[in-house]
Image (cartoon, rainbow, N blue to C red):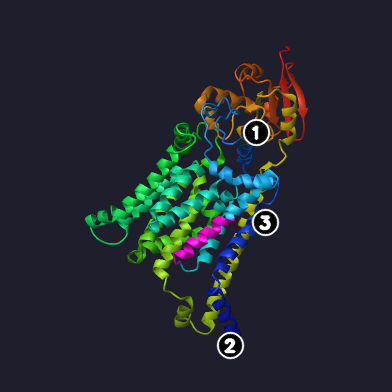
Amino acid sequence: MFKIKNIWQKIQDWYYNHRWIGYLAVFLIALIYFVALQWTPVFADPDAFYHSKMAIMIRDQGLIKNFIWLPFTVLGNYYIDQHFLYHVFLILFVSLFNPLWGVKLATIILAALLALVFYWFLKTSRIKWPGAWTALLLVSEPLIFRINLVKANSASLIFILLIVYALIHRRYLAVFFLNFFYVWLYGGWPIIIPTLFFYLLADFFAGEGGVRERLKRLFNKHNWFSLGAVFGGLIVGVVVNPYFTQNLNFYWQQFVQIGVINYGAAIGVGAEWYPYKPLELLTASSPLAAVFIPLVLLFFIFIKKQNRLSWKFLFLSLFFLAITFKSRRYVEYFIPAAVLFAAFSYNAVFGRFRLRDWRREFFSGWQRWALGAVWSILLVFLLIIIGFQSINLREGLRRGYSFTGFKNASEWLADHTGKGEVIFHSDWDDFPALFYFNSRDVYISGLDPTFLYKEDAKKLEDYAAITRGNYIGDAVKTIREEFQSRYVLIGKDHPQMKKLFDDRPEADLIYDDKDVWIYKLTDRL
């Protein structure tokens, strides 16, 4: 036993003298985990094709200012690359590797970097057990699914963590520039505004004193500097922008019309815009819930021990939880905020608590063995839950859009149609893959159906009815006259739509493979 203790002490001493090992371990474990989850030629989200194509086009053509591929949507009139810096980051990966595999690798690296930055944030904040809190983040299924999509989600979270760190340490120049580049990185940058509001509002509630003292804390000079640095960076990022003033209209459509108003009840939008049900979220993030809920209760029991940061992360986690019940995409903000709250609140209450001393004081003999057995059972139970979640994650990330699903049909269209031909396709989420493989032609709807809805609600109504196969009227005539299209591409998951063209003499089936049918509409009666 003495030798084992000596060996363990030497391991601890070596670790304390080589702190970088912890950072390297977190990054490598996360990297291997994410590779195991999603290294398959399938995208769980179709937008991956769009992001890949945009990186290629920026590399080859420079800034894309006119998006001619969706002429019937608002994007045909004004377009901005709301993920410009993200697409610039992807250029390296689409250039060194097969572009579709390249963006997968970029996504895995960004997700692993998020885990590393999260661990660093906790470590530099002197939080007890930063590795355990980072592990809790990595076993939260909804977050891991979101950051493994080929989107700017991980990059966005990294920026927010850096912004919060800079705010805590009053590095206002860093806050300014981080917010400036955040606008260029991610179209959802307005999320930083309510984040800042609730971050600062916590100063009113943290600590003691009357209303006057609380207001004085809230409106201190450092908070004014924080407001100035954040809003200054955001405003300059919007104005000093290659898309100004076109970006103002786009942000209105993207953040207000799609994000806040959300027409999901009227039209079929992406799944991420529909809400989480409380029980569904509780089940999906059960390890986090098992920690977060008790610590919220303990927060109010030990409220006098709480510091400003535990208050701030409580406010942020509750805010993000509320909007997650509006749109499930915000779960990617709720989970990190909830873990940070749990870590900071636990530290405030139990920071000086040592499990070893508590066990020696209150337990002896067989009781210690019983306590160890209970902890072992709980650990096994947790590992079983994590195992099932990992299986679900793996299956979820491996279902979706094959790298080659629309490849042959798109290339056939590129070879057999004139440049700029309008392709009437069977679903709005077909667009990214069609665009990736064939950017010679143009399409009806894509990226979000709201873009078509806001440009011409009647067109969206007719488009949706035809693609569902329940259009009342002459679908062929409508496609020819209203949509100015001669080619109809139908995914084989839309058999009802195909029935509208069967036995029509003016609709010729000219292409058929395992994924799609393509009809050519003629003037023949």
* CB under 8 Å between discs 3 and 1: no
Amino acid on which disc 1 is placed = Phe
Q: Earlier in the sequence, mark 3 or mark 1?
A: 3
Amino acid on which disc 2 is placed = Phe
Q: Earlier in the sequence, mark 3 or mark 2?
A: 2
Of residue 5 and residue 245, the one placed in the foreground of this image is 245
* CB under 8 Å between discs 1 and 2: no
From mark 1 to mark 2, how far is it between C-alphas?
67 Å
Mark 3 = which residue?
Answer: 36
Q: Quadrant of the N terminus?
A: bottom right
Return the x and y of residue 68 as percentages of the image width and height. Answer: 59, 27
Of residue 348 and residue 186, the one placed in the foreground of this image is 186
* CB under 8 Å between discs 3 and 2: no
Q: Secondary structure at mark 3?
A: helix
Q: Secondary structure at mark 1?
A: helix
Q: Secondary structure at mark 2?
A: helix
Residue 325 visible to the viewer? no
Which stretch did the figure color magenta?
A: 112-126
Magenta-colored stretch includes residue 117: yes
From mark 3 to mark 2, how far is it between C-alphas?
40 Å
Of residue 313 and residue 507, the one placed in the foreground of this image is 313
Amino acid on which disc 3 is placed = Ala
Mark 2 = which residue?
Answer: 2
